[in-house]
Amino acid sequence: MTSRKAGSGAAGGKSAPRGGAPAQERELRAQGRKTMRKLLDAGQIVFEQRGYHAARVDDVVRMAKTSHGTFYLYFSNKEDLFKALAEDAMAQMAGLGNDLGPITPDEAGREAVRAWIERFFDVYSKHSTVIRAWTEGEIVDNDLGRQGQKLLTKLAQQLAARIEETDAADAADPQIAALSCLAMLERFTYLVQSRQISFERDEMLDSLAAVTHAGFFGGADAGKSRRLRRAR
Amino acid sequence: MTSRKAGSGAAGGKSAPRGGAPAQERELRAQGRKTMRKLLDAGQIVFEQRGYHAARVDDVVRMAKTSHGTFYLYFSNKEDLFKALAEDAMAQMAGLGNDLGPITPDEAGREAVRAWIERFFDVYSKHSTVIRAWTEGEIVDNDLGRQGQKLLTKLAQQLAARIEETDAADAADPQIAALSCLAMLERFTYLVQSRQISFERDEMLDSLAAVTHAGFFGGADAGKSRRLRRAR
Amino acid sequence: MTSRKAGSGAAGGKSAPRGGAPAQERELRAQGRKTMRKLLDAGQIVFEQRGYHAARVDDVVRMAKTSHGTFYLYFSNKEDLFKALAEDAMAQMAGLGNDLGPITPDEAGREAVRAWIERFFDVYSKHSTVIRAWTEGEIVDNDLGRQGQKLLTKLAQQLAARIEETDAADAADPQIAALSCLAMLERFTYLVQSRQISFERDEMLDSLAAVTHAGFFGGADAGKSRRLRRAR
Amino acid sequence: MTSRKAGSGAAGGKSAPRGGAPAQERELRAQGRKTMRKLLDAGQIVFEQRGYHAARVDDVVRMAKTSHGTFYLYFSNKEDLFKALAEDAMAQMAGLGNDLGPITPDEAGREAVRAWIERFFDVYSKHSTVIRAWTEGEIVDNDLGRQGQKLLTKLAQQLAARIEETDAADAADPQIAALSCLAMLERFTYLVQSRQISFERDEMLDSLAAVTHAGFFGGADAGKSRRLRRAR
DNA sequence: GATGAATGAGATTTCATTCAT
DNA sequence: TATGAATGAAATCTCATTCAT
């Protein structure tokens, strides 16, 4: 998924790459690509396990079964690795914006909402740690922060457009509503992902869909959802 | 606000409890209490400014205009100080659970929701960094994590009880709905607090109240909110 | 036993006592003497438990149920307290030198040796930690080191005199033999005291007396000791 | 002499085993082995010069002409380095147990004793500081303490076996006698080593051999030793 | 390309000693 | 006399990054 060249992140970094070659863009041969992938995978896992700050280059290197020296052949520093992963995650998340069509207040609309939430949930889950770390103010890197902001804004706008098409837009500012919706989904998914709460998947998606449909898209909650719950 | 004695955590040293150890409970005199307060305040600010990880004991000490040694007279380490602040924050947040009465689907209900959200917003804002840091898995301390969990659960239960009284309970599991609601408020507030998004306060509260009322409490969005928006 | 005035040790220390009064010689009233005794007793115990280096003033102070400030009212520093205890111990040990009369090669001689070893053992035991710490090169204080040296020399000379009176003096240099004897007794007692070895008291004294009598005083090991062992 | 891998102790950190942790066993290349040796040698010297407690990692590092970071690449802390040296010393000392054959009461026996004491003296001297520090209870590490105990016991047993073969066994318990003998040699050597006493080497060995032979092995002190002394 | 080794700035923590009441 | 509070110099340890094969 990542198609970046080696050490892309540092290209625009504050201090130009020193002496050697680490952070220079260069095309990689087969072996090089394999090593890079090992490092990215290891990074994913390590950031997942320990969080951005607690993660040590050494952890990544050991997990990837390679050496410190090699790491810096591919990434100019820890942040650079993180950025590579984060950009990947962002691209995936950005895709969600296009996946949502107009939402009707009826059951069909609720179904559409549910389907979209499911996609959101799955994409987020795959990249949760990375997203989490970047969401926080902790990664001070402005570049990444700005990109995250841009993503958030873009998703919110696309969502706001859908909201605006509905009655609900009378009650709440669509932009605010859209951000609230994203906030809710993001946080809820995070809580599930980090095992702080735990629910059965279908039930969870049903409920999220219900409140989202009713709260943000003016949905009238009738029919199916009610019946579903009764059946249980 | 904080009524804890000096030091909270277990000493945790390798051998027997050390000397005049910082982490032992001791009664403080006037001067001692003053110094402790200075340190707590400084901690609050420093964690706010730099985040948990970037914060150094040195920063706290400098801000409190005291010495390293003194710091360790009151807290056994950075985490211990953080815990003190976090417990404070938790206590405040926990108070919110009792502030919410039954919510009707009419305008009065929406007003009640708005008032509650406002309180949530204000309390959260006062402790945002601390809450944020503890919310993230970043602070590894399990004790604190467990306390946070407990707080979340308790708040969710109280909220769920209110939701259950309404029609909306048919559409979504009250527990899930309650957690979604908290997730939304928490994250939205955080985004505002961290300057990632920015809105005019009243507009923001109105909109949050509207979606919350409609989405979680089965509120019918009529009357005032609609007129409000039109007037703008 | 200790009749020193407050802070005697520091009198000849390198840096003269600063500002206040801590290390000045002064006569103590009843309460003062009581406090001093508390500190000395506490010191004895703490040095015993943790060894000189690991012992912290704080430990002493806590054990004596008094304060840091008070400690420095009576002793100019940790070493000063130690010295007070050590001098006490030395005085007691020095007394041993006079307790040994001429040793005959017969059973009576062996009995005399045994009685003396017993005294040695008991005196040493009462002050073992302090003696141990001072024996080591670790306490760099030259003053104390010199005093220890003097004590060793004096004891050795008195012992050598007794050895010289016997036949054994032909085989070994009395001075060397005397020091060997003290070395043996000191170390053996230490091993017992520190629980590194463990024997029944009478058996231990019998055996030590036997080897000492035979090895250092030319004793012929006949009679009683042999019978004793057989009887067992 | 030392064949240990890098780091010996358990990591002992509070959480999971840290990064490229120093205390993990790793195979070393030529350069690594060289550095490790430099550190061991430096440690030997520094412990010698300043004693265990006064020795700072910084001293070792400076003497080895390397960096702090490097030190922790090879040893997890000061104690770990010490342990490495101590184990080395123990191994050497343990070897002494096998070097002592049966002791006859005649002059040949005394010569054998003398030769053995000489070996004891030399081995001990080479490792005196390390042995001393470990002998004292000062190094709290229980593992090392237990190893020391084991060594002492083993040496004592081998010595006791030799004593048991002689007449002297009637007069004293061989186990106690053996330990007394070791105590004497250890302490005497230590006193010499630490410059607290000083003798001409041959004279010292002659005398020690004489008292040892007579006291522990039932030696009759006739002939040579007497003549030797007269000749002086 | 790859690697093990080295570095050193920086953060944390301890504790003997002094101060102010 | 007594005390709790404060100090700060030292010591330990970590880890991102660079170097030399």
Image (spheres, coloured by chain):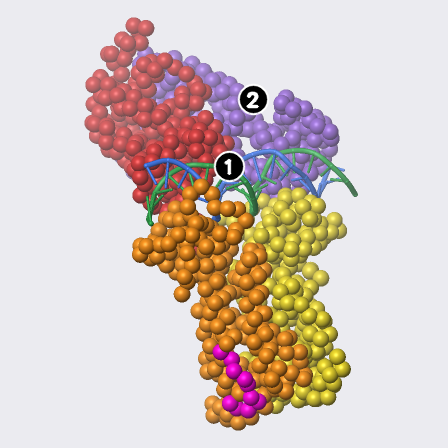
Chain colours: A orange, B yellow, C purple, D red, E green, F blue
Q: Residues within 10 Å of mark 1 (few under 14, many from 20)?
A: many
Query: Mark 1 falls on what kind of element?
Result: helix
Q: Nearer the viewer, residue A41 or B155?
A: A41
Q: What residue do we see at 36% from left, 24% from top?
A: D125
Callout 1, which amino acid?
A: Gly
Label total for image? 2
Residue D193 in the image: x percent, y percent?
A: 40, 22
Label ID, residue C147: none
- Which residue has dot 2 on it? C143
Q: Are marks 1 and 2 in contact (CB under 8 Å)?
A: no
Q: What residue do we see at 42% from left, 14% from top?
A: C161
Q: Subunit of mark 2? A: C
Q: Residue furthest top?
A: D231
User: Seen in the image, is C51 located left or right of residue C81?
Assistant: left
- Which residue has dot 1 on it? C51
User: Seen in the image, is B73 located left or right of residue C204?
Assistant: right
Callout 2, which amino acid?
A: Asp
The residues tagged by marks 1 and 2 sit, at their Cα atoms, a distance apart of 20 Å
Residue E8 in the image: x percent, y percent?
A: 51, 37
Residue C203 in the image: x percent, y percent?
A: 35, 35
Marks 1 and 2 belong to one chain? yes
Magenta stretch bounds: A99-108
Q: Subunit of mark 1? A: C
Up/down of D110 relative to B213, above or below: above
Residue C63 in the image: x percent, y percent?
A: 60, 43
- Dominant secondary structure of the magenta stretch? loop
Residue A103 magenta-highlighted? yes
Up/down of D73 relative to A75, above or below: above
